[in-house]
Amino acid sequence: MVTIALPDLSTTFLIASIVPIIIGFIVGVIIRNAIKIGIAIAVLVVLLIAVGILTPSQVLTPLASLVKSGSTQAAVTAYANRVAGYLPYSSVTFLIGLAVGLWKG
């Protein structure tokens, strides 16, 4: 028979368990709000194009130049990798907090 040892409920264990949940929740809320803002901006741009205030080329030209600039893309990728290195995304408690933040945030 296999016995499972319960973890000690020391302060260190509790902090090591709770901090990734809180960080995951905050990241989930930020991602959820960023998605909401992105959708709102997309709807606004589509509405402005439909009304005739903007043309599709006025929207697509700056986006295409942003994608084509290699140095900017490399800088953003390096920054994203650096920020992702701070997040404990391999922790189950972080993923639980992230899911709750995305769902309830």
Image (spheres, rainbow, N blue to C red):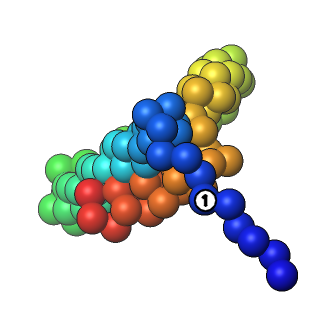
What amino acid is labelled 1 in the image?
Leu
* Residue 23 on image: x %, y %: 42, 40
Instruction: Return the x and y of residue 1 as percentages of the image width and height.
Output: 83, 82
Q: In this view, does 47 lie to the left or right of 70?
A: left
Residue 13, above or below 98: above
The answer to whether residue 27 is seen in the rendering is no
Q: Quadrant of the C terminus?
A: bottom left
Label 1: few (<14), some (14–19) or many (≥20) C-alpha neighbours in 10 Å: few
Q: Is residue 54 above or below residue 12?
A: below
Q: Name the residue under label 1.
A: 6
Q: Residue furthest bottom?
A: 1
27 left or right, relative to 95: left
Residue 77 left/right relative to 94: right
Q: Residue placed at 48% from the left, 60% from the top?
A: 96
Q: Is residue 49 above or below residue 63?
A: below
Of residues 86 and 73, the one nearer the viewer is 86
Q: Which residue lies furthest to the right in this view?
A: 1
Task: Determine whether the residue tagged by mark 1 lies in a helix, strand or loop.
Answer: loop
- Identity of the residue drawn at 44% across and 34% down: 11
Residue 51 pos. (x, y %): 16, 62
Q: Which of 2 and 41 is in front in this view?
A: 2
Task: Compare residues 100 and 58 and report the one nearer the observer.
Answer: 100
Question: Could one spot residue 70 in this view of the protein?
Answer: yes
Name which residue lies at 64% across and 23% down: 82
- The mark tally for this picture is 1
